[in-house]
Amino acid sequence: MGMMAFRAAMALPPWLIKLKDQFYINFIADDRYMYLVRGLWMTLRITFFSVLLGIALGVVAAIIRSTHDKTVDDMRPGLGKAILKILNAIVKLYLTIIRGTPVVVQLMITYYVIFQSSTNTMLVAVLAFGINSGAYVAEIIRSGIMSIDNGQFEAGRSLGFNYIQTMWYIIIPQALKNVLPALANEFIVLVKETSVSGYVGIVDLTRGGDVIRSRTFVAFMPLLAVAGIYLIIVIIFSKLVSVMERRLRNSER
């Protein structure tokens, strides 16, 4: 009788047993956790390459916009001034369209209209998210460039640099320091924006959780796992950015 009472006291409560069973069904049975593993890997790859593309587009667009704002009034009429105005108009149109439409619509247009014959869904997603991110990065970096004192440009000229060299070696590094928190926030947003990749058939992290839900007909645990993984990614990235900011501040002393 004493042993039976001990076993009864050590037995798991019903609600915990239910959670344990749900965990097994959702993640252990048939190795369903692999949907999350593969989805996480896809999300990280899309985010990484989209960030690279977004930075490249953003820097180019920011240089064009800031160059136009800083120099167009002082330029003599001619081909150079005309080209700069045309490039600035193109960039402004790009920023207006991208920032004025939802990213999921841009993704679907890229996949179903522009690259409808392509079978490389990851490449399509990288292009869509990278172009979208580039528009926001451009305005962030442009604000950083515009915040740099004009004396820095004069210092570059005194060192024998041309305008592009002055931008690349002197202005852009200082601008990036100033806008690092805003850039970090943009990249965190990008990580979460990739969750709509499932609209074009990509099994990313969010879609992986949805696949598990469709197999088990239980939504709580898969969605909780997906949300937890996104949260961990954001926390890690935010911590890395904080460390980078601290090192940049220390290097200025």
Image (tube, rainbow, N blue to C red):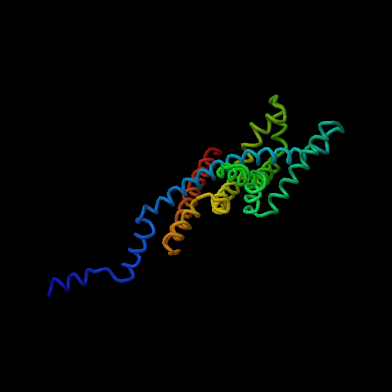
In the image, farthest residue toward the bottom = 1
Q: Position of residue 66 (x, y in %)?
A: 73, 40
Where is residue 17, by image quadrant?
bottom left
Q: Position of residue 243 (x, y in %)?
A: 49, 44
Pick the front one: 30 or 130: 30
Q: Position of residue 106 (x, y in %)?
A: 65, 50
Q: The C terminus appears in which quarter of the rendering? A: top right
In the image, farthest residue toward the left = 1
Res 226 visible = no
In the image, farthest residue toward the top = 160
Q: How many marks?
A: 0
Q: Residue at x 47, y 45 (%)?
A: 41
**Does 79 sit left or right of 66 as displayed?**
right
Classify 24 as above or below 124: below
Q: The N terminus appears in which quarter of the rendering? A: bottom left
**Does 213 sit left or right of 157 as displayed?**
left
In the image, farthest residue toward the front = 117
**Does 169 sit left or right of 154 as displayed?**
left
Q: Position of residue 21 (x, y in %)?
A: 33, 64
Q: Residue at x 43, y 51 (%)?
A: 35
Res 119 visible = yes
Pick the front one: 85 or 105: 105
**Does 212 sit left or right of 167 as displayed?**
left
Q: Residue at x 65, y 43 (%)?
A: 141
